[in-house]
Structures are given as structure tokens and as C-alpha cells.
Image: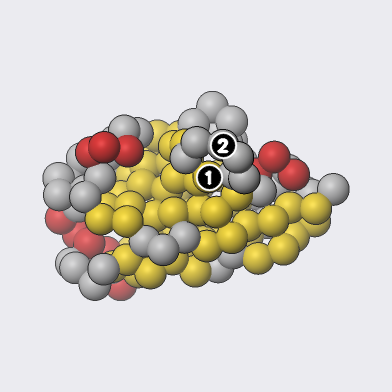
């Protein structure tokens, strides 16, 4: 249902753009990005509602990451700037059955396979 891509190895201060392609018509659904670092719980990163008019970010990424969507392409993006070593994690995209955004993992029905982001110091 969801295919995440765009991860890789980047130096601190660098940028990456993650993509999440949905096999469902994404226009109707709220989407989110989450991440899980080694030995840690999965945590919320960013979320966007169906229209793109509402976004919300974790404090740790606010001002550095931007979530956006292209409903014509059924794709959601996460632009990550000024990357830090602590951003190293597997990043997961997720899709709700509702059009609104949410930071709560249990409110997401579909999950992608994850893409690895590694930031070197």
C-alpha cells in the first residue's frame, strides 16, 4: 500500500527528501512520518491532512523538516534539511483512514516498509 524511498547516508548539515507513494488515492487520507532509531521506540516526526492545509511537527524537527503532498501523484514527501546525527533512524510513512492529520501512531491504519536515514558527524 505504501512505498517509502529516498533514504541514504548524508553528512551532518546535509539534506534528503523522502517520498511515500500510496497505492490508494491519497487525496482522502491524512498521512504521517515516523522514525525509529536503534534501541528506541518509534516516534512521531510530521503529519499532514488530506489537503495539505494542516501540518504538524515534532519539536525536534520543527524548522528543519517540511512535510508536503502531491495528491495527483498519491505521494507524500518529507524534506529534511540541516540533518543531525540524532536524526539517524528508519523512517516510516503511514496513512490514516481519515482525512485529518494526527501525531498518534495508533490512529494510522497502513504503514510503509521504512527507509534508512543515516547522518554522519
Q: Which mark is residue 110?
A: none
Residue at image point 47% right, 40% down: 42
Residue at image point 60% right, 40% down: 39
**Rounded to the nearest whole Å, what is the CA distance between mark 2 and mark 1?**
6 Å
Q: Quadrant of residue 61?
A: top right
Task: Specify the farthest residue to the right.
Answer: 121
Q: Residue 47, image x and y in percent?
A: 37, 42
Residue at image point 31% right, 33% down: 104
Nearest the camera: 3 or 17?
A: 3
Q: Which residue is mark 2?
A: 40
What is the quadrant of the N terminus in the image? bottom left
Q: Residue 74, image x and y in percent?
A: 28, 68
Task: Specify the farthest residue to the front.
Answer: 39
Assess whether mark 1 and mark 2 are in contact (beta carbons under 8 angstroms): yes
Secondary structure state at the residue bearing disc 2:
loop
Residue at image point 40% right, 34% down: 56
Secondary structure state at the residue bearing disc 1:
strand
Q: Residue 78, image x and y in percent?
A: 49, 54
Q: Which residue is mark 1?
A: 36
Q: Going by the image, does 26 lie left or right of 75?
A: left
Task: Specify the farthest residue to the top.
Answer: 59
**Badge 2 density bin: few <14, some 14–19, many ≥20, Cα 10 Å:** few
Q: Is residue 21 visible?
A: yes
Q: Is residue 100 above or below residue 78?
A: above
Amino acid at each position: 500500500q505504501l512505498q517509502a524511498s529516498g533514504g541514504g547516508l548524508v553528512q551532518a548539515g546535509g539534506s534528503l527528501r523522502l517520498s511515500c507513494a500510496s497505492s490508494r488515492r491519497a487525496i482522502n487520507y491524512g498521512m504521517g512520518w515516523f522514525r525509529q532509531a536503534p534501541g528506541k521506540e518509534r516516534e512521531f516526526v510530521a503529519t499532514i491532512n488530506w489537503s495539505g492545509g494542516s501540518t504538524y511537527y515534532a519539536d525536534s524537527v520543527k524548522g528543519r523538516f517540511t512535510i508536503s503532498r502531491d495528491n495527483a501523484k498519491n505521494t507524500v514527501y518529507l524534506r529534511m534539511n540541516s540533518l543531525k546525527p540524532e536524526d539517524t533512524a528508519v523512517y516510516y510513512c503511514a496513512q490514516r483512514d481519515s482525512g485529518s492529520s494526527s501525531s498518534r501512531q495508533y490512529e494510522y491504519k497502513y504503514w510503509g516498509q521504512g527507509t534508512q536515514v543515516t547522518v554522519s558527524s
